[in-house]
Image: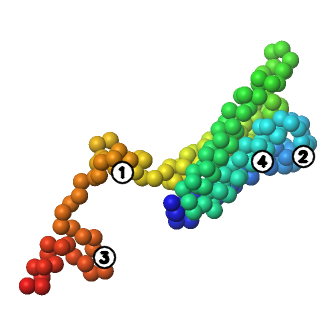
Amino acid sequence: MRLARTTGTGAGLLVLILGLWAGFIPFVGPYFHYGFGPDATWHYTVQRLWLDILPAAAAVLGGLMLIGSGRRASGTLGGWLALCGGVWLLVGPSFSMLWQHPPAGVLQSGIGVPLGGHDRAAAEMIGAFYGVGALITMLSAFAIGRFTPARLVAAPGAPATEESGEAPPRRRGLIRRRRGTVPSERAGARHL
């Protein structure tokens, strides 16, 4: 079903910007001593591929699909793609401890050692993973809701829809007011 092209534009644009941030911050963050070790700009590692580049690419692609979607299917697919990228940004650093084998007593995930102290490390975790992932997840879930048909989100006790096989109750004698038409019962009375 065709929709207005602006249905996912706002959320898609924000998801696109956040996805670009998540993809580029590990590579340009060391210019400002922001990020995780190694402290080298444009340094590629397999960890950065799995934890930064792939979820950021999913968010960017999902954001582009949301911006350009004019149909429910493409908008919903873009929303789900961005949602997967956002969720992976949230759980990826914790999940990476399964393949990272740090020395005994050191809790370090696959993202590397934060470049700053304790306070700055918290800001780096939020700014590179958790906060960005939460915002992408929220915005993409909002966009998925915008692309969901209203009849699938009917409230309990609402009249039955076409999907249940029963027709909703009709009101007799009323015609929509378009271009000067009036309810059918009053139309005859006016001309008498």
* Front tag of 2 and 1: 1
Closer to the N terminus: mark 3 or mark 2? 2
Q: Secondary structure at mark 2?
A: loop
Instruction: Assess disc 4: are there few (<14), some (14-19) or many (≥20) residues with their C-alpha within 10 Å of its C-alpha.
Output: many
Look at mark 3 in the image and give the residue it sits on. Answer: 178
* Front tag of 3 and 2: 3
How many angstroms separate mark 3 from mark 4 (CA)?
51 Å
Q: Residue furthest top?
A: 104
Closer to the N terminus: mark 4 or mark 1? 4
Look at mark 4 in the image and give the residue it sits on. Answer: 23
How many angstroms separate mark 3 from mark 2 (CA)?
63 Å
Closer to the N terminus: mark 1 or mark 3? 1
Residue under the point 81% across and 30% down: 110
For badge 1, the amino acid type reads Glu
Q: Picture coordinates of residue 176 (x, y %)?
A: 27, 70
Q: Is residue 14 visible?
A: no
Look at mark 1 in the image and give the residue it sits on. Answer: 162
Q: Secondary structure at mark 4?
A: helix
Instruction: Assess disc 3: are there few (<14), some (14-19) or many (≥20) residues with their C-alpha within 10 Å of its C-alpha.
Output: few
Look at mark 2 in the image and give the residue it sits on. Answer: 41
| Mark number displayed over residue 14 | none
For the residue pair 23 and 61, the one nearer the viewer reads as 61
Q: Quadrant of residue 138?
A: top right
Q: Picture coordinates of residue 125 (x, y %)?
A: 72, 37
Q: Quadrant of residue 83?
A: top right
* Front tag of 3 and 4: 3
Closer to the N terminus: mark 2 or mark 4? 4
How many angstroms separate mark 1 from mark 3 (CA)?
25 Å
